[in-house]
Amino acid sequence: MCRSIKTLRPPALPTEATEEDIRAAALQYVRKVSGFRAPAAHNREVFDRAVEEVTEATRRLLEGIEVRGS
């Protein structure tokens, strides 16, 4: 999908993902899906809200994943 989004869970990431890592991945996802690197002023609110929602969903996902056998 988007090659610049990195896997954020161990063992792919040697340490726990930071808030910055999670937000960067969310931003890349929203950019890819929307087709905008930077939205126009009239789309800024919905774009930023999407980034925040994807950030939160990613954080919950990473907190809930149980990695076995590593």
Image (tube, rainbow, N blue to C red):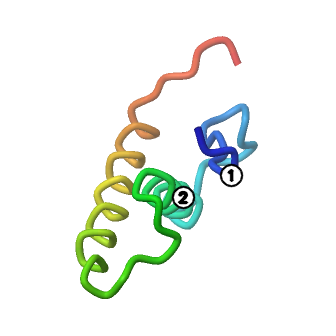
- Of 61 and 38, nearer the camera is 38
Q: Residues within 10 Å of mark 2 (few under 14, many from 20)?
A: some
- Of 38 and 17, nearer the camera is 38
Circle 2: residue type: Gln
Q: Residue furthest top?
A: 69
> Left of 4 or right of it: where is 26?
left
> Left of 35 or right of it: where is 44?
left
Q: Residue 62: x percent and y percent?
A: 46, 39
Q: Quadrant of residue 48?
A: bottom left
Compared with 63, 26 (above or below) is below
Q: Residue at x 37, y 63 (%)?
A: 51
What's the CA distance linking mark 1 and mark 2?
A: 7 Å
Compared with 20, 28 (above or below) is above
Q: Residue 59: x percent and y percent?
A: 40, 49
Looking at the rendered structure, the number of numbered marks drawn on it comes to 2
Q: Residues within 10 Å of mark 1 (few under 14, many from 20)?
A: few
Q: Residue at x 47, y 59 (%)?
A: 35
Which residue bears the numbered disc 1? 4
Mark 1 in CB contact with mark 2 (< 8 angstroms) = yes
Circle 1: residue type: Ser
Q: Residue 47: x percent and y percent?
A: 32, 69
Q: Residue at x 33, y 46 (%)?
A: 57
Which residue bears the numbered disc 2? 28
Q: Which of the numbered marks, if any, corresponds to residue 37?
A: none
Quadrant in the picture for the N terminus: top right
Nearest to N terminus: mark 1 or mark 2: 1
- Of 68 and 3, nearer the camera is 3
Q: Residue at x 59, y 59 (%)?
A: 21
